[in-house]
Amino acid sequence: MSKPTKREFRAIQTLFYSTRSTCDRLRTATTLWSPEPENRPLGAGYNGAPSGVPSCDEVGHLMVEGHCVRTIHGEENAILNCSNFEKLIGGTAVVLGTPCYKCAIKLVQVQVKKIEYYGTYANAQGAEHIKELFEKAGVEWSCYSTEELMMFLSKGIGILRSKGGALKDFPDDSFIFTS
């Protein structure tokens, strides 16, 4: 079985970061990567309340004009956690769900030149304007289906269950996806 492509690997990493999200309106995350061919991780973040402050999952949503404002968005957290802004220039951001316009601006500002996002988020503020922003900023962007994420995850599990993989000894029926 072939190893994941760079896009598959980035998507799976971002998907796993989203499991740390503390807002059930959209459990999302963003990862930031250096330009290819290096494709090294430089930052990651999920949406959640600031450290030490109660989260949506603990105390509920703080709604203002139809949007929860209790959380820092995944894109913002990824930028705040970025290890080296200079290496990010020309790099890639991977986002779960449609970025809101304010986060899209921030990604443009740190000079990301490629944005891959998986699935759409219908409540993303200003999302109808991001295409124009990305075009004017020279940012390549692509929206992919969440079905692709499931295919990437399935491929990863297959690799882990094959010879030499960390999950090679688990029986076939031990992987039952439950909520």
Image (cartoon, rainbow, N blue to C red):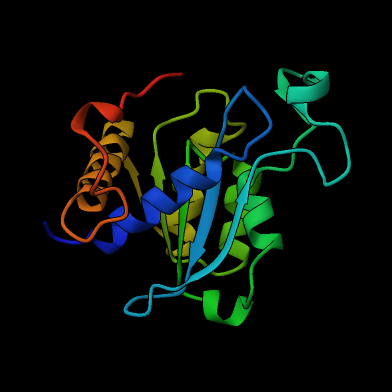
Q: Quadrant of residue 23?
A: top right
Observer-nearest of 30 and 126: 30
Q: Residue furthest left?
A: 1
Residue 132 left/right relative to 61: left
Residue at figure coordinates x 62%, y 23% from the top left = 24
Residue extending furthest right?
A: 53
In the rendering, at what x and y percent does residue 128 appear? 50, 33
In this picture, residue 100 sits left or right of residue 51: left
Q: Position of residue 126 (x, y in %)?
A: 59, 34
Residue at the image position 29 percent from the left and 63 percent from the top = 6
Q: Quadrant of residue 109?
A: bottom right
**Image location of residue 80, percent across then percent down:** 71, 61
Vertical placement of 103 versus 35: above or below?
A: above
The count of marks equals: 0
Left or right: 175 in relation to 20: left
Q: Out of 157 and 97, give the one closest to the viewer.
A: 157
| Residue occupying image coordinates x 29% and y 53% | 8
Task: Tell me if I can see residue 62 in this picture.
Answer: no
Q: Is residue 45 above or below residue 110?
A: above
Q: 107 or 79: which is nearer to us?
A: 79
- Residue 88's spot in the image, x, y percent? 53, 74
Vertical arrangement, residue 174 with respect to residue 106, above or below: above
Residue at image location 33% in from the left, 33% down from the top: 146
Question: In this orientation, does residue 77 appear?
Answer: yes
Q: Quadrant of the N terminus?
A: bottom left
Q: Is residue 66 left or right of residue 70?
A: left
